[in-house]
Image (cartoon, helix red, strand yellow):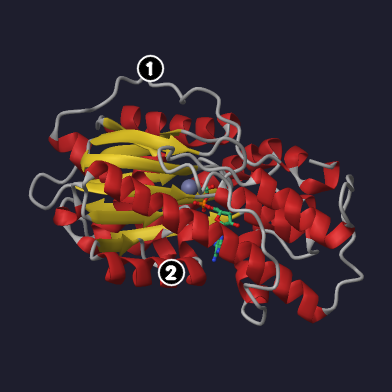
């Protein structure tokens, strides 16, 4: 088991939603090899992730992806010293594929199993780029399933400060993209469309922004406002964007994006103020958004706090951020093989996409 003469190698596995990923990382946090298979083409025509299709795609891809990660690292399975797996939160069927593969490898190789919280790992992506002194910090995760703020005292202690009470930020991007006739995933598509638009063309609501005590998010009012701007007030059902000119579409995309950015910046500032932290770490797919990155950088400069945003390649789901498992390993936190997936958290299922009238 493992490689007693060299650095300890960790195999990290990620299958929480619609990306199948594996990475080989050494105990100096150097990424030796990494592989990722997206399922965008599987889910595109549904405008959101279909959980059953996601699980089946993970089953097909998990072994080739692990093989590819090992091959890019130039190592064999028998040099792996521990296996880490994201076991919560996520789609139940998807999580089970990664967890089962990880357990099987632990039995076969006789190595420890390390549990990774996917949201904590998104924040840890900032530590990989920014160094150990990013802690203590406020952590903001903005992904397809979550918009969450944490007080991170150290890499093992994440205290939730607030989260979304309805749609997550990425979910809002995906649903609004669907309304605008843009492809899935919606975030990158809206980002591109917004470049040519006027972010002040529409004054969309900024949910909960006036409630300074509350570190929660709400994006459903914003989503409805975009719907009404496209289809008319009080409308429901499927939105038809075909009457929009390119300029109107760009203005809607830019104004929507600006509203999300304003909320995320405002709540991050509130969290920094409430905790007294001077570092903000931001991860998750939406953290790849250029307008958000620019607005946060400007705010950090003005308010004089340290900002670490995960590198774009580590914002969306990946296995490299599973390197957080080394923190648990060092603290002796390894799991029994009875480890289960976290309580069933269902994320941005296609059934909630705007075409159903939500
Ligand atoms: O972190 P992630 O890959 O998966 C989850 O854990 O959910 O986040 C995916 C989400 C999707 O909703 C996608 O539309 C959004 O991140 N996203 C973006 C961008 N890239 C991905 N949102 C805004 N701008 C982007 N450039
Ligand atoms: Zn994620």
Rendered residue at 34%/46% (across/down): 271
Horizontally, is 331 left or right of 142 in the view? left
Q: Quadrant of the C terminus?
A: top right
Q: Is residue 81 above or below residue 339?
A: below
User: Is 100 in front, or is 139?
Assistant: 139
Q: Is residue 44 visible?
A: no
Rendered residue at 36%/36% (across/down): 161
Rendered residue at 79%/75% (across/down): 248
Q: Secondary structure at mark 2?
A: helix
Q: Is residue 63 above or below residue 31?
A: above
Q: Secondary structure at mark 1?
A: loop
Q: Most extreme residue toward the left, as rendered?
A: 5
Residue wearing tag 2:
295
Label 1 crowd (10 A; few <14 / some 14-19 / many >=20) = few
Which quadrant of the view contains residue 50?
top right
Q: Quadrant of the N terminus?
A: top left
Could you say where residue 244 lies in the image, as x and y percent from the top left? 86, 72
Separation (CA) of disc 2 from disc 1: 44 Å
Residue wearing tag 1:
338
Could you say where residue 296 lies in the image, as x and y percent from the top left? 39, 65
Could you say where residue 143 lies in the image, as x and y percent from the top left? 51, 50
Label 2 crowd (10 A; few <14 / some 14-19 / many >=20) = some
Lower position in the chain sequence, tag 2 or tag 1: 2
Horizontally, is 260 left or right of 113 in the view? right
Could you say where residue 17 lies in the image, as x and y percent from the top left? 56, 43
């Amino acid at each position: 088991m493992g490689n007693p003469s060299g650095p300890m190698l960790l195999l990290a596995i990620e299958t929480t939603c619609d990306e199948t990923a594996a990475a080989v990382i050494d105990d100096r946090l150097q990424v030796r090899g990494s592989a990722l298979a997206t399922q965008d083409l599987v889910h595109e025509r549904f405008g959101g992730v279909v959980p059953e299709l996601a699980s089946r795609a993970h089953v097909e891809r998990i072994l080739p992806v692990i093989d590819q990660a090992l091959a890019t690292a130039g190592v064999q399975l028998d040099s792996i010293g521990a296996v880490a797996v994201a076991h919560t939160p996520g789609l139940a069927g998807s999580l089970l594929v990664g967890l089962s593969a990880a357990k099987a490898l632990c039995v076969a190789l006789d190595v420890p199993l390390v549990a990774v919280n996917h949201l904590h790992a998104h924040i840890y992506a900032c530590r990989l780029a920014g160094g150990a002194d990013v802690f203590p910090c406020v952590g903001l995760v903005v992904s397809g399933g979550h918009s969450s703020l944490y007080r991170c005292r150290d890499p093992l202690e994440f205290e939730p400060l607030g989260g979304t009470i309805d749609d997550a930020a990425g979910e809002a991007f995906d649903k609004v993209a669907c309304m605008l006739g843009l492809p899935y995933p919606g975030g990158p598509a809206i980002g591109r469309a917004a470049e040519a638009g006027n972010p002040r063309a529409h004054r969309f609501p900024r949910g909960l922004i006036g409630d300074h005590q509350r570190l929660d998010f709400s994006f459903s009012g914003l989503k409805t406002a975009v719907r009404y701007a496209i289809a008319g007030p009080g409308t429901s059902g499927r939105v038809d964007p075909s009457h929009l000119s390119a300029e109107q579409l760009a203005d809607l995309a830019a104004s929507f994006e600006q509203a999300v950015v304003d909320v995320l910046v405002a709540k991050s500032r509130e969290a920094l103020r409430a905790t007294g932290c001077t570092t903000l770490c931001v991860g998750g797919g939406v953290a790849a958004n250029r307008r958000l990155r620019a607005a946060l950088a400007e705010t950090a400069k003005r308010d004089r706090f340290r900002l670490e945003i995960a590198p774009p390649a580590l914002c969306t789901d990946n296995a490299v951020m599973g390197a957080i498992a080394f923190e648990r390993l060092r603290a002796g936190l390894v799991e029994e093989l009875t480890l289960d997936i976290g309580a069933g958290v269902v994320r941005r299922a296609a059934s909630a996409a705007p075409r159903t009238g939500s």
